[in-house]
Image (cartoon, rainbow, N blue to C red):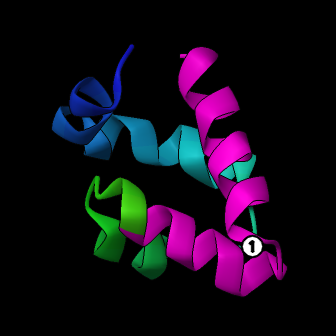
Amino acid sequence: MNWDQIEGKWKEMSGSVKAQWGELTDDEIAEVNGDRDALEGKIQAKYGKTKEEVKAEVDKFLSSH
């Protein structure tokens, strides 16, 4: 699955996102609305990780779906 597919199915994917990054609130996930950059920014802010770490995590998430 590529990011365009995830973006198109964001409502369905939001449960998987919540499972992967449980510290994100439902409101934060809704705000992202499928925007990968926004998701990475929220993860980075919540978890205090570097941009590279977050990008790798999102890539891994993407490859698992």
Q: Which residue is mark 1?
A: 23
- Taking 55 as reference, is 29 left or right? left
Is disc 1 surrounded by few (<14), some (14 to 19) or many (20+) residues within 10 Å?
A: few
Place of residue 56 in the rendered image (x, y in percent of width and height, measured from the top left)? 71, 42
Give the dominant element type of the magenta stretch: helix, strand or loop: helix
In the rendered image, residue 59 lying in the magenta stretch gets the answer yes
Nearest the eye: 64 or 29: 64
Q: Which residues are magenta?
A: 38-65
On the rendered image, what quadrant is the N terminus found in?
top left
* Quarter residue 7 falls in: top left
**Can you say whether 51 is above or below 10 in the image?**
below
Q: Image point 26% across, 61% down: which residue? A: 33
19 over 48 or under it: above or below: above
- Give the image location of residue 5, x and y in percent: 24, 24
Q: Secondary structure at mark 1?
A: loop
Residue appearing at x 28%, y 45% in the figure:
11
What residue is shown at x 47% (from left), y 64% (from top)?
A: 39
